[in-house]
Image: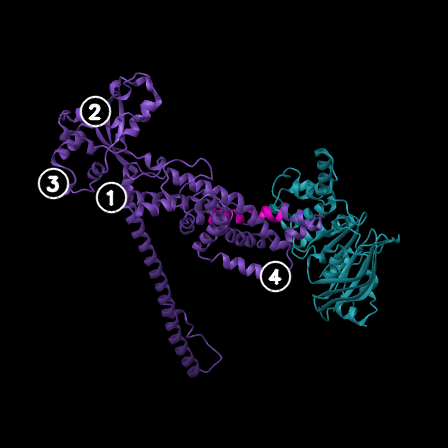
Chain colours: A cyan, B purple
């Protein structure tokens, strides 16, 4: 038996949560390329699920299926079912705009709009008509920035451009923007890969708080990060889901040889 | 030289002899490479200096010919508005006022000022030659504006004739024999006297900016052409910008990538390179012969220039939209914006500086365009200001073209003067585009 890397692992919650997102036989094709093969996984509510795996393994592709971001790529084709709260999100009757209001997304590189901090957070609620007055909107912006742990730092300069913040602050602003439309699921695509360790620690802390209220799915390159923030982990390799389970089990007692090789640093 | 920096004496893994050989070879080749680089830089500098020299010659020739057109010689006359000449009936009938012999009044006033004999017909004719042939218009306008001044003596600045103007600007050689000089000795004496007395002066030429076409150079101006150009620019702005931006947004954001959109794209790029005279032929065939719009009207010119400007605006807008980072689109879609919202709230506003720059460059190109306007009959002698885009007018570059074909010295300087005005307008527009781009570029 190989020596396991020394990882600090979050104990899974004592309470078992219901399944929020359920994928069944999801396949993704980019033109001729079969990017994702027969992925089936259940993702519990109010917890953090981490997708790990080497570059090009399909973990981001799968993440982008969950809010149908792949629709924006003309050659991408998705088959199979992804069910959120008993509703197939690839059902033709489902409105993709409504889906994305329920499934927020935070991207790899912080991408605030080149507008004020206030406008960044207010944009989502405004287009969805979630506020009826300026006071309502102020309240939403305030609460979202508070939840994203950014309120104290920016409350005196809400009208400054969001692009003027530091990288970590920008990423928390993007999280606040996602929270503002009151989603149920938050997808994070390597949210810390462009950040320094201190900013990363802040985001991880934030993720840990957010899981009290949201179903969070995070793609990460860092196994340490997966171990620190997630309760469940899925390991992807060459477009397939190799293994999925409690984070503790994946990191201490992987069933598949490939998982073991990856987390012990043999490849990837 | 940089040769010193070659690490010839560094201890290397190779044995001494081989090392020296290699270093020598490298040094030799490096000398050649540096020389090639210097030569290349020299070619570049030479090319730029060559271009600058031509530009300097161009500007020098235009400015040296054209600057005199901004002043015009005028006489300050105390004109006695003789009631018996203007309004013998005393009815102040507008038709009578309009057709009265104001030239006679001006001649008398000038003759008095110069001390010439008003009874001598030969003298009076020579005095008359000093005044612009359109001098009656200037006095008539004074009278019509203020009929109560009839019977009084009023001070008026009236234009001197073209040859007086030429003489004052030094364009006529006063040392020539009187027979070939166009100005008699008597006239020369009068001119000198008037100038010494301050009655004859070179004043700022407002007429150049306000007058329409005229066969007399001293009263010819670009007023009508400016209004015509303005109407055309407005037509282009109102039609080409919405059409161009809509086409570009569709092609860039919505259109499927297939054979047909590729074909459209190639053809838009080709259209931008089509000679402008072809657009003139198209406009003649469609807007005048088929749609029956009036010839010489600025609306037709505007439509033709719209067709010509569209490809420029589409290409610039597509480039600007393409330069908006995809992360902004993803961010908008990620919070649940529809595609249209992502485009209208984020992509187009961010692309706006690029779109505006392209638009202004396109407009500037259209403003300076002559050939297609010749095809649709905008080479016209238009005296009256156009009241609407449907009325006949000319355009600034066409006016320049028409003046350039006239022989009089006054038209030559006006050709250069109007060119200066056109160049100034174009430089202003391009400067505005540059400022916009500087101010708003890369806000993310």
N-terminal-most mark, 2 or 4: 2
Give the residue pinned by disc 3: B178
Q: Which residues are magenta?
A: B345-362
Of B119 and A242, which appears nearest the observer?
A: B119
The stretch drawn in magenta includes residue A97 = no
Q: Chain of mark 2?
A: B
Between the C-alphas of marks 3 and 4, the distance is 75 Å
Whether the residues at callouts 2 and 1 have beta carbons within 8 Å, the answer is no
Residue in the picture at 41% in, 81% down:
B21
Between the C-alphas of marks 1 and 3, the distance is 19 Å
Give the residue pinned by disc 1: B409
Q: Comparing marks 2 and 4, which lies closer to the viewer?
A: 2
Tally the marks: 4
N-terminal-most mark, 1 or 3: 3
Q: Are the residues under marks 1 and 4 on the same chain? A: yes
Position in image of residue B86 (x %, y %) = 28, 21
Q: Secondary structure at mark 3?
A: helix
Q: Chain of mark 3?
A: B
Of A217 and B376, which appears nearest the observer?
A: B376
Label number found at residue B260: 4
Q: Chain of mark 4?
A: B
Give the residue pinned by disc 2: B109
Residues packed near mark 2 inside 10 Å, few (<14), some (14 to 19) or many (20 plus):
many
Decide if residue A189 is in sight here. no
Q: Are the residues under marks 1 and 3 on the same chain? A: yes
Q: Main secondary structure of the magenta part?
A: helix
Position in image of residue B240 (x %, y %) = 53, 47
The stretch drawn in magenta includes residue B357 = yes
N-terminal-most mark, 1 or 4: 4
Decide if residue A76 is in sight here. yes
Residue in the picture at 52% in, 54% down:
B311
Q: Secondary structure at mark 1?
A: helix
């Amino acid at each position: 038996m190989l020596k396991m890397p020394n990882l600090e692992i979050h104990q899974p919650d004592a309470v078992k949560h219901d399944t929020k997102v359920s994928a069944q036989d999801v396949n993704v094709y980019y033109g001729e390329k079969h990017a994702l093969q027969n992925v089936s996984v259940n993702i519990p509510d109010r917890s953090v699920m981490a997708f790990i795996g080497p570059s090009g393994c399909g973990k981001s592709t799968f993440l982008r299926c969950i809010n149908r971001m792949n629709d924006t790529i003309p050659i991408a084709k998705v088959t199979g079912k992804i069910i959120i709260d008993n509703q197939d999100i690839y059902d033709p009757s489902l409105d993709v705009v409504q889906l994305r209001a329920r499934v927020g997304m935070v991207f790899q590189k912080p991408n605030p709009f080149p507008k004020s901090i206030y406008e960044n957070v207010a944009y989502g609620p405004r287009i969805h008509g979630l506020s009826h007055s300026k006071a309502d909107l102020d309240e939403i912006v305030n609460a979202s920035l508070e939840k994203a742990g950014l309120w104290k730092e920016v409350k005196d300069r809400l009208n400054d451009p969001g692009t003027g913040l530091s990288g970590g602050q920008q990423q928390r602003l993007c999280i606040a923007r996602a929270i503002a439309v009151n989603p149920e699921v938050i997808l994070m695509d390597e949210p810390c890969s462009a950040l320094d360790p201190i900013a990363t620690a802040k985001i991880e802390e934030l993720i840990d708080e957010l899981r009290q209220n949201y179903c969070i799915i995070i793609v990460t390159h860092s196994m340490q990060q997966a171990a620190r923030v997630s309760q469940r982990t899925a390991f992807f390799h060459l477009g397939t889901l190799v293994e999925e389970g409690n984070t503790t089990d994946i990191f201490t007692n992987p069933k598949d040889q490939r998982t073991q090789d990856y987390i012990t640093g043999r490849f990837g | 030289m940089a040769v010193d920096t070659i690490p010839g004496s560094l201890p290397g893994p190779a044995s001494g002899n081989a090392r020296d050989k290699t270093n020598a070879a490298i040094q030799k080749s490096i000398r050649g490479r540096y020389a090639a680089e210097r030569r290349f830089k020299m070619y570049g500098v030479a090319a730029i200096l060559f271009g600058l020299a031509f530009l300097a010659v161009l500007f020098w020739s235009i400015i040296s010919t054209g600057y005199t057109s901004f002043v015009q010689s005028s006489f300050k006359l105390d004109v006695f508005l003789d009631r018996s000449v203007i309004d013998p009936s005393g009815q102040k009938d507008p038709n009578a006022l309009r057709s009265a012999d104001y030239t006679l009044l001006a001649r008398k006033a000038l003759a008095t000022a110069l001390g010439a004999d008003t009874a001598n017909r030969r003298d009076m004719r020579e005095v008359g030659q000093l005044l612009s042939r359109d001098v009656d218009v200037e006095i008539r306008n004074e009278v019509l504006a203020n009929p109560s001044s009839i019977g009084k003596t009023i001070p008026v600045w009236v234009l001197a004739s073209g040859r007086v103007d030429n003489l004052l600007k030094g364009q006529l050689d006063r040392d020539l024999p009187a027979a070939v000089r166009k100005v008699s000795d008597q006239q020369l004496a009068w001119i000198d006297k008037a100038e010494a007395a301050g009655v004859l002066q070179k004043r700022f030429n407002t007429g150049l900016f306000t007058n329409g076409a005229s066969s007399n150079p001293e009263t010819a101006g670009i007023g009508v052409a400016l209004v015509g150009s303005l109407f055309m620019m407005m037509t282009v702005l109102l039609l080409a910008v919405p059409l161009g931006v809509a086409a570009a947004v569709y092609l860039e954001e919505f259109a499927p990538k297939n054979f047909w959109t590729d074909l459209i794209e190639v053809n838009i790029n080709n259209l931008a390179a089509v000679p402008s005279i072809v657009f003139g032929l198209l406009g003649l065939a469609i807007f005048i012969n088929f749609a029956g719009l009036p010839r010489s009207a600025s609306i037709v010119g505007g439509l033709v220039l719209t067709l010509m400007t569209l490809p420029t605006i589409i290409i610039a807008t597509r480039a600007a939209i393409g330069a908006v980072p995809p992360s902004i689109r993803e961010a908008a879609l990620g919070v649940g914006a529809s595609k249209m919202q992502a485009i209208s709230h984020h992509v187009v506003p961010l692309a706006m500086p690029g779109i505006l720059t392209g638009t202004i460059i396109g407009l500037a190109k259209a403003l300076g365009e002559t050939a297609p306007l010749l095809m649709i009959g905008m080479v016209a002698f238009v005296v009256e200001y156009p009241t609407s885009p449907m009325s006949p007018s000319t355009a600034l570059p066409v006016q320049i073209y028409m003046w350039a074909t006239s022989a009089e010295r006054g038209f030559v300087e006006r050709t250069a003067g109007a060119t200066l005005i056109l160049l100034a307008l174009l430089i202003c527009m391009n400067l505005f585009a540059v400022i916009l781009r500087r101010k708003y570029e890369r806000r993310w």
